[in-house]
Amino acid sequence: MKPVKVGLLGLGTVGTGVVRIIEGHHEDLQSQVGSPISIHKILVRDKSKGRSIAVDPAKLTDDPWEIVRDPEIDVLVEVMGGISGTKEIILEALERGKHIVTANKDLMALHGPELLAKAHEKGCDILYEASVAGGIPIIRTLIEGFSSDRITKIMGIVNGTTNYILTKMSQEGAAYEDVLKEAQTLGYAESDPTSDVEGLDAARKMTILATIGFRANIALEDVDVKGISAVSQQDIWYAKSLGYVVKLLGIAERQDDYISVSVQPTFVKQSHPIAAVNGVYNAVYVHGEAVGETMFYGPGAGQMPTAISVVADLVAVIKNWKLGVNGRQASISYKEKKLKSDRQIASKYFMLLHVEDRAGVLMQIAQVFSECDVSIESVMQPPTPNRKGAELIIITHEASKESMNHVLKAFGSLSTVQQIQSMYRVEG
């Protein structure tokens, strides 16, 4: 029985997990695909480096083109990361008729449509389940499980680092800077945490999910991004006292074929199931017109959860190969991209204002909201004995982003408003 030969690009954390699964589950995998799966060659940076698993040194190479141009290799599994050089490697592999499995969210967010088009042209598969939410099979679910439904909303915690930080701030009252240092010590955050804490990692993942869910080519620049670095312990406290938790959410919505995608810290009602997702776990909430509300929960990163998704894609590629249907999946993105204007994007909002503590101020605030066509749901003025002036907590009814921008502009020129400390979207 002829084995399926795999070229593995990368032997880091995830690559090591892939080797462990393929070698440890070889009987189960063979029973599913009808052939042995063999890792034929492995790309590494340093062939002499010590490994946590035993690997035949003859399989190691530091030249990616040796793997790409090897006629015996049928499938490339890319888990090395990077964008520019990696893109060229994958395009060349597709030109040579090799199928691709990748965990590279950056690559798929920026160049996914181009790579998918090339794969379709060459009759090849390119599968990328592990690029979003680690061990949660959300991409396959959106493509296959929702194929007969029309998705209207995808909302997710898709970055474990920020969810860990916000969870610790909420449950333990810890300061942002302290939790960030702890996350770096534990390996949850990089030494330069910008991609995580400023929402860029989540934005790339939401680009992928929105493109799949709405069948339109959403670009990274279409995502409105705000990170968690400005979230204060005071914001966390007020959220909790009002029955909310603060989560960094990716939110993609479609209404009448118009789409909006954002990543932002959000007040989530404690009764919403996504509010209970804590630590480094991920969750993706999907609303379909027919099925209604669904949610998918699990580990969003880590060696084995991510490797499981990679190998599941490998199994799918080989099954398609046995059936002779590689590259025949209809193009995911067949709809024209129509982005919502600020007038079409609507939600409830939380605002925390520092204002002068004197008669008539609240009336001025209410007048601004009225003139900007924003209805107020509730107003609170908590005691501030150690502060000059007063604090106002305002939660609006659903209002357009355009109207809220007008409110912010008006408050900026109102002398009685000393500071707009924070404003968050409210969900649930």
Image (cartoon, rainbow, N blue to C red):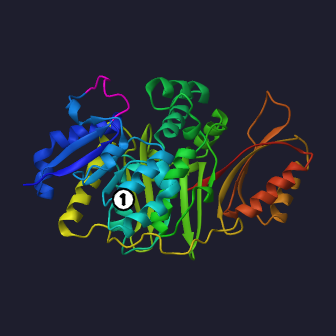
Kindly identify the amino acid type of the residue bearing the numbered disc 1. Leu
Principal SS element in the magenta part? loop
Q: At which x and y percent is residue 126?
A: 35, 59
Residue 332 in view in this figure: yes
Residue at image position (23%, 65%) is 320
Q: Is residue 196 left or right of residue 45?
A: right
Residue 83 appearing in the image: no
- Verify whether residue 48 appears in magenta: yes
Left or right: 24 as drawn, with respect to 293: left
238 w.r.t. 225: above or below: above
Q: 294 or 336, which is in the foreground?
A: 336
> In this view of the protein, which residue sits in the foreground, 346 or 342?
342
Q: Which residue is mark 1?
A: 94
Q: Is residue 112 left or right of residue 7?
A: right
Where is residue 351 shown, x and y percent of the image? 72, 48
The C terminus sits in image quarter:
bottom right
User: Eyeballing the image, is 293 above or below 23?
Assistant: below
Residue drawn at x 49%, y 48% is 106
> Residue at (36%, 59%) from the top-left corner?
94
- Residue at horizontal 38%, vertical 32%? 45
The magenta stretch is 44-52
